[in-house]
Image (spheres, rainbow, N blue to C red):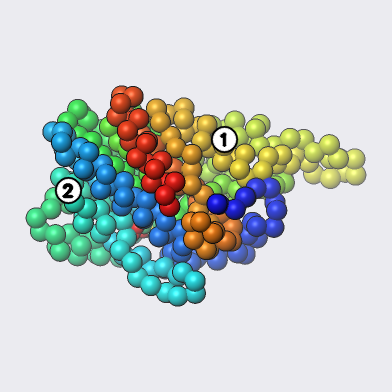
Amino acid sequence: MVEPIGGDNGLLPDEDELDNVSRDQHSFGGAWTLIKLGALEKYLAAFNTVLSKQSFTRLYIDAFAGTGRCDIKVDGENKTIDGSARRALDINPAFHKFCFIELHSKKLMALNALRSEHPGKIIEIIQDDANKALKTLCTQYHWRRERAVLFLDPFGMHVEWSTLETIAKTGAIDVWYLFPYAGLYRQATKNADALDADKEASLTRVLGTDEWRKVFYVQNPQSDMFGGGNGDVRDIDHPQMLKFVSKQLKTLFPAVTEPKILHRGGNSRNPSGPPLFALYFASSNPSLKAHGLATKIAKDILNSL
Ligand SMILES: C[S@@+](CC[C@H](N)C(=O)[O-])C[C@H]1O[C@@H](n2cnc3c(N)ncnc32)[C@H](O)[C@@H]1O
């Protein structure tokens, strides 16, 4: 069972701890890394097996590709494991084409080396911001003869709503989205006085609406009695905030699973530490048969983790 989360119940990290989480992620993943990559890998294998009986060209798109390897720390032990790009390349039956998007030059060098290890495979490497690259890529294909799996694995609040809109419009892309749960509750501060313009813009960019301001915050009944600030306070707990995310995603995609909450420590069945990410699967395919099967496979995988 995933331990209950929500409210400011002591499970949540303070600002310093979240800063450490962000810093760690540049060199270290953790328990959540194993879970997300396990889910992705299982889905990629199932996707290719099912679609190998059809004539579609199968694409794998990794929008925050990294290097092909992840340095993680689990139970105090450092290890290096295969990252998403390397795992996708090893899937059998294989994808017909791979597209790796990565912003940072040093990681590009590793991706180029990874491509050299696979001379028989068609691998496109794009150095750009994921939002920009995805918008271009989604409009490059007609999506009549292609089907794709896209992995959105950002460190934080990087995926813009307008990017998700473009992806959803293809009707041909299945998405695994590691939603930045900690980023969300960190930006949506408990006290609205601490919401600056950057935080507000980031929330609107990621959630696709500024409705969150009305849904998350109420006027503090005790405000101004003693001459305090404007007094708005966040009135909903973290799981309710995530429900708002799910509701938003369902306005774009025909099928969206319940998210799997990934914590800082422990393992999937016995998590510990603050919730960091929420792993969603969404299918953009309007066909009930297609997105029904895709979500059944994804749900089975999420339930098995
Ligand atoms: C969590 S890591 C991805 C790990 C990778 N999926 C794996 O399993 O090995 C996020 C990656 O996104 C890259 N990145 C950060 N901001 C980006 C952006 N705006 N566009 C594209 N890549 C970005 C980082 O350099 C980093 O390699």
Place of residue 153 in the rendered image (x, y in percent of width and height, measured from the top left): 39, 51
Describe residue 123's horizontal placement relative to residue 105 as left or right: left
Tell which circle, 2 or 1, labels the residue nearer the N-terminal end.
Answer: 2
Residue 163 appears in the picture as rendered: no
Residue at 17% x, 48% y is 93
Asked if ligand 1 lies within 8 A of label 2, the reply is no
Extreme residue toward the left, this view: 120
Q: In front: mark 2 or mark 1?
A: 2
Point out the quarter of the image occupied by ligand 1.
Answer: bottom left
The correct choice, above or below, for 57 with respect to 95 in the image is above
Q: Considering depth in this image, is 29 or 124 the residue closer to the camera?
A: 29
Kindly check if marks 2 and 1 are in contact, taking CB atoms under 8 A apart as contact.
Answer: no
Extreme residue toward the bottom, this view: 77
Residue at 27% x, 32% y is 172
Place of residue 104 in the rendered image (x, y in percent of width and height, measured from the top left): 33, 59
Kindly identify which residue carries mark 2. Answer: 93
Q: How far separated are the C-alphas under marks 2 and 1? A: 37 Å
Residue 85 appears in the picture as rendered: yes
Q: Amino acid at mark 1?
A: Phe
Q: Amino acid at mark 2?
A: Pro
Q: Considering depth in this image, is 291 or 188 the residue closer to the camera?
A: 291
Disc 1, SS: helix
Disc 2, SS: loop
Residue at 64% x, 56% y is 12
The label number, if any, that marks residue 244 in the structure image: 1
Place of residue 232 in the rendered image (x, y in percent of width and height, measured from the top left): 75, 39
Residue at 35% x, 70% y is 80
